[in-house]
Amino acid sequence: MQGVWTPDQIRAAEQRLFTRTPEPQVMRRAAHAVSVHAVRLLAECTGGVAGRHATLLVGAGNNGGDALWAGTFLRRRGVGVTAVLLAPDKTHPAGLAALRRAGGRAVAADGPSPDTSGIGAEAADAVERADAVIDGIVGLSGRGGLRPTAAELWRRVTAPVVAVDLPSGVDPVTGAVDGPAVLADVTVTFGGRRPCHVLGAGAVHSGDVEVADIGLDGYLPAPELHLLDAAEVGENWPVPGPEDDKYTQGVVGVAAGSATFPGAAVLASGAAVQATSGMVRYAGPAADVVRSHWPEVVATGSITDAGRVQAWAVGPGIGTGASGREVLLHVLESGRPVCADADSITLLANDPTLWDARDPDAPLVLTPHAGEFARLAGGEAGTDRVSAARDVAARFDAVVLFKGNTTVIAAPDGRVLVNDSRHAWPATAGSGDVLTGLLGALLAGGVEPWLACGYATFVHSLAAELAAGGGRAAGGARSGGSARGPAGPGVAPADGPGRGGTFRVGAPIGASALLAAVPDAIRSVREAAFRAAFR
């Protein structure tokens, strides 16, 4: 499991490190890592390194210093380097001197012969002829969008971008983007990921995040957030063993859909079938339709006739009237782990007496989208979705899976998992029903609820990406592509140019296509686990 640390945690760890290792030495170590990734980007995008040109966008302070030292290392590789200084009187002096000694140039952003936007002629030329750009405008102390001069320089960038620590203009804590912000191909960060690399728009703007070792490992506290990778999901995804049968692997009950709208029942039940090799029981008015699509499901027309289950997935399409309330009440009273989605969340938000039916020892997972979350919380989540999810999880003593392009999974004890998908292919009707079925099956298989949410979300996102790409990754979560689409910043990051002149594009999908890709997604994460085990 990968960690994510807040800016305050990183700063404190750095101060402890500086008592043992001089700060300039640590800066050069960080800058060298930036230069290594800039060299790789140049080679991949231009076919060479020596003779190419890199432009540094340099702000005040240490972030700009990292960029200047990175430029110094690039000069040693034969790269022409020009630093565009946004705050010449506050530029890191040692970094600037080192760059000049190495033969690099430095020009003021608002230098001689400015154009109508206030950008000097030399600065404009440096940006326009760059083969790669290093973003060292602001660091972890930055807040808000790029200031006007920086924003104008960024608007002119067409070359691939390496960001130092974080893309300038992205909020380091929440990942929010409230104005112009750098959209990086690669972000090189130091010691560990920051929240802005995995949350909200920041996950998109960061591009591929590379973590460089600068010696912080022994000084970092417990991480604020956690990320799963494919190998970990694959290693822990339930598969049958020699002694297993359909019962030992878990029986999940699905209460979803209606006679008029049976789609939710079909999708949730199908996802449960695809997720594990146990048994799926469906209870509800769409029983005949479910059986016709999934003959292996044991389907009955009433929740009271469902039989024994190890967990319930309830809510999609059950309605918010009296019949839906009765279904949810039965499930909550069962004493089994429950994944409550869609209409069941609305029922819980509108009728506080339903909480009294819950067995306090039975795990409960709530899977709201933004609107449902607002009903539960009594207001909008705002930009700090992590704190909002933590608050709701603690209030209701439940695991909260707060859906979104970045999915935040909060446990009642404060632990938070993040799935930092950089695509939006699951944004289609019915995809949440698929997630509910996956999650219910994992709960029935005995997977700890917080981790079950993480595993289900990861596979769900990957299945959507595979479906959109026709069986291959069409850009997205940590899959290695450019963050900039063919028309430049603002284009969907799941499409567009990848490294080395390749293109990866996807097509919109429906929930049925996502569901059909679930087995391939599970194979993919299990293959990653095998590769990791035999590396």
Image (cartoon, rainbow, N blue to C red):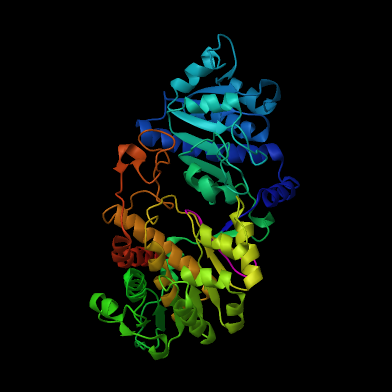
Query: Does residue 333 appear anywhere in the picture?
Result: yes
Snapshot quadrant of residue 62? top right
Snapshot quadrant of residue 244? bottom left
**Residue 504, percent from left and from top:** 31, 45
**Magenta highlight on residue 408:** yes
Query: Residue at image x 41%, y 81%?
Result: 252
Snapshot quadrant of residue 271? bottom left
Vertical position of residue 305 compared to residue 316: above or below? below
Give the residues in magenta: 405-415
Q: Residue farthest to the top?
A: 113
The number of discs equals 0
**Magenta highlight on residue 72:** no
**Closer to us: 458 or 51:** 458
Q: Residue farthest to the right?
A: 19
Query: Residue at image x 62%, y 45%?
Result: 172
**Residue 37, percent from left and from top:** 48, 39
Q: Main secondary structure of the magenta part?
A: loop
**Closer to us: 408 or 318:** 318
